[in-house]
Each structure stands twice: as structure tokens, then as C-alpha cells.
Amino acid sequence: MGVGRVLLVCGMPGAGKSTLARRLAAERDGVLLCPDDWFVALGLDPHDARRRRAFERLQGAQGLDLAVRGLTVVFDFGLWTRPDRRRWRDRARSAGAAVELHALDVPLVERWRRVERRNAEPGAVVISRGQLESFERWWQPPDADELASYDAPPGPSRP
């Protein structure tokens, strides 16, 4: 079996990452890795940064192992900063996998509208307006040079 692909989905809360990640996993017959799903299912605090970093490292290592086995793996980790994205890209490439970046950059006002609606859903990771605004300082949207450092999706290009 050949080496697979790693799809990194990045963006801030409310940008549509999880929706896109689920769609990509379904379209590509891939494995979806979403820490939020696990935190909620296990009754853990999804805002515990130390635990989240440890969990993402563990889940990411598992994802890279799956990619080495020829699978497509979708990382729904947020990946707000360039160094975080670069580290996962480099790890996946070192394992021999192709790596795509799917970025969503949505204005804060629209993301708050979506988060506010999602907060009312059962099992949602609740985020306050203050938290959402405080996260802004971490967001580094990918520029053209960064996007060019990733592999293109297979097949015909999409609009």
C-alpha cells in the first residue's frame, strides 16, 4: 500500500473547519481526527490547553501512522499559527505523505454568528464572545507563499 495524504484544515472557531473536515473525509474516504469530538465524548474540558496539546500530539502521531499505511487523514486541529502548520506539514512529509492545506479565513462578526448558534446545540464546545475575540491574536492566515508550500488536491482543481 502506498503512502497516503494528510489534509490540514485550519481556521478560527466558527470558520467552518469541522464542516469542511467532515466533507473532505467523506469525499476522500478519509479518517477524520477531531480533538473536540473526543473531548466532548469523554467529558473533558475542551479549553484545557495543556491537555489539548498533548491530545493533538497523540492523535496526530496516530494520523501520521495511518497516512504511512496509505490512508487519507483529515486533521481538524485549528492550526491557527504558521509554525503549527509547518510542524505538521514537515512531520507528514518526513513520513512520506503528501500534505494539503485547507484554510478558512472568515470575519469575526460572521464567526460569532455561527458560534452563537452552535453554542445552543447539545454537546457543543461552548465559546464566549470574549474567548472568540481573545483568540484573534493567535490567528495567522496563510499567505500565498505558505499555500504554495503544500501539495495540490488530486484531480481537477476546484473553484
Image (cartoon, rainbow, N blue to C red):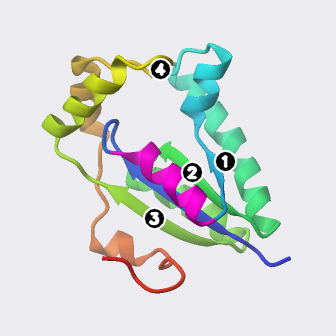
- Between marks 4 and 2, how big is the CA–CA gap? 18 Å
Quick one: 131 or 1, which is closer to the camera? 1
Question: Pointer 2: what residue?
Answer: 75
Three-letter code, disc 3: Leu
According to the picture, the residue beneath numbered tag 4 turns out to be 47
Whether the residues at callouts 4 and 2 have beta carbons within 8 Å, the answer is no
Placement of the N terminus among the 4 image quadrants: bottom right
Q: Residue at x 56, y 24 (%)?
A: 50
Magenta residues span 16-28
Q: Helix, strand, or loop for circle 4?
A: loop
The residue where tag 1 is placed is 60
> The residue under label 4 is which amino acid type?
His
Local SS, label 1: helix
Residue 47 appears left or right of 37: left
Q: How many marks?
A: 4
Work out how far the residue at label 1 is from the one at label 3, CA to CA, in angstroms. Answer: 15 Å
| Residue 104 part of the magenta-drawn span | no
Q: Are marks 2 and 3 in contact (CB under 8 Å)?
A: no
Query: Residue at coordinates 26% horizontally, 52% vertically from top-left?
Result: 105
